[in-house]
Image (cartoon, rainbow, N blue to C red):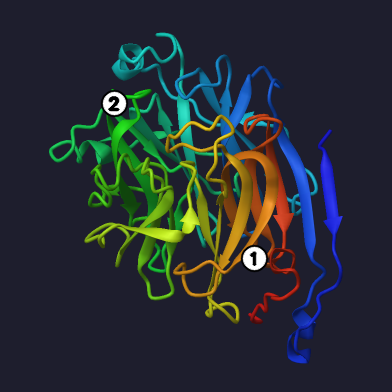
Amino acid sequence: MQARRFIALALCHGLLAASAAFCAEPLLEKTDLWQAGQGGYKVYRIPGIVVTARGTILAYAEARRYTGGDWDTIDIVMRRSTDNGKTFSPQRVMAHVPPLPRSRVAIERKQGNADDLTYNNPVAIADKNGTVHFLFCRDYMRVFYMRSEDDGLTFSTPVDITSTLDAYRPQYQWRVAATGPGHGIQLESGRLLVPVWLALGTEGNGHQPSVDSTIYSDDDGKTWRRGDIAVSNTPDTPDPNETSAVQLADGRVLLNVRTASPRNERLVVASKDGAHHWSKPEFQPGLPDPICFASIVRLSSKRDSSRNWILFANPDNLARSDGKPIASKDRRNLTVRLSYDEAKTWPVKRALEPGPSGYSDLAVSPNGIIWCFYEAGRSPHERLVLAKFNLEWLTGGRDSLARKAN
């Protein structure tokens, strides 16, 4: 059965009377959605979450069967809730494609066995029209797209869109590629946008050296195109890879990027259309990075609420328990942050999981409830936990979200 933990805090305080109608009791609930060792899988990793236009929650992840590594035999699994997270459907395996040859990179780098079937890096987009777009990779070398017209109950047959990434090869001879992970976004124009990373596959476990970009669709997912390379592999920005995207109030798209930089800070870069003419990459001192995937999402905009607010989540820790002086730090102290100035600064932060915790993905329901789906446990990969909370919990009752009437 699902393990549910509930924390109810004091009522909001210190708000003006004009805001009292929107004041809610601070709320935090946590539900374990997947547990390592169950269902025939060693671990469940790489969480992603979206909330559909109808309010259905779709939580998805990689189910790693044998070793738990990136090149293991992996299935993509999903669970679905139609009652605001009270209950979830049993897990189902999402992705099936015809047999494909094993990646040569996996064999060269001694990553897994020749017969491993690696489905990886699922990314969903909750379209404003109710469609759910879903992308995933096979063996870090092919990308597929499918869609749901019934709120994530069923999905279309996967379509191979790897040619979109092949268009990078004249500029960057990638051998390993992946979408996201986490979630993609839909711009105000209707454009569908998914961050991607591409690697030469000659270093580490085959995921380095790497560069970052985006792919996009302007015709409801029928066709996909490549964007410009947004962040290159340089001495200052080594191995940019897993990236999250958010559209800013002025229409620009901001990428929040993981790199292997010893600065241990998140990297940001922006574009007017989310695909071309990216700004010069800049590190953001207010966002520490232990070198781990992070999530960014818009909480509210002046279009539908009273404020432009953006959320960010990642492990807030820059120490190693073994004391080794290397850039990668222990993944723990998963923290949610709030920005009042379109992701320039992050004055509000609150720890969601003080212990071991890793990848996370954020989503927001139409009613303003916030969801964070993340890795946690005695090790960062023991459980996949879904946290449900509100702005009042995040800010200790100082802020409340006022939704405009339709």
Q: Helix, strand, or loop for circle 1?
A: loop
Q: Looking at the rendered structure, which numbered label has been put on residue 366?
A: 1
Q: Amino acid at mark 1?
A: Pro
Front in this rendered view, residue 297 or 279: 279
Image coords of residue 400 (percent x, y): 70, 75
The N terminus - image quarter: top right
The part of the image, by quadrant, that contains residue 45 is top right
**Measured along the vertical axis of the image, is residue 76 above or below residue 370?**
above
Q: Is residue 270 above or below residue 175?
A: below
Where does the C terminus fall, quadrant-wise?
bottom right
Badge 1: residue crowd in 10 Å (few <14, some 14–19, many ≥20): some
Residue 201's tag is 2
**Which residue appears at 79% of the width and 44% of the height?**
87
Q: Which amino acid type is shown beneath numbered disc 2?
A: Gly
Number of numbered callouts drawn:
2
**Viewed as shown, does residue 230 lie left or right of 314?**
left
Residue at 51 percent of width and 38 percent of height: 329
Inspect this view and state whether residue 145 appears.
Answer: yes
Which mark is nearer the camera, 1 or 2? 2
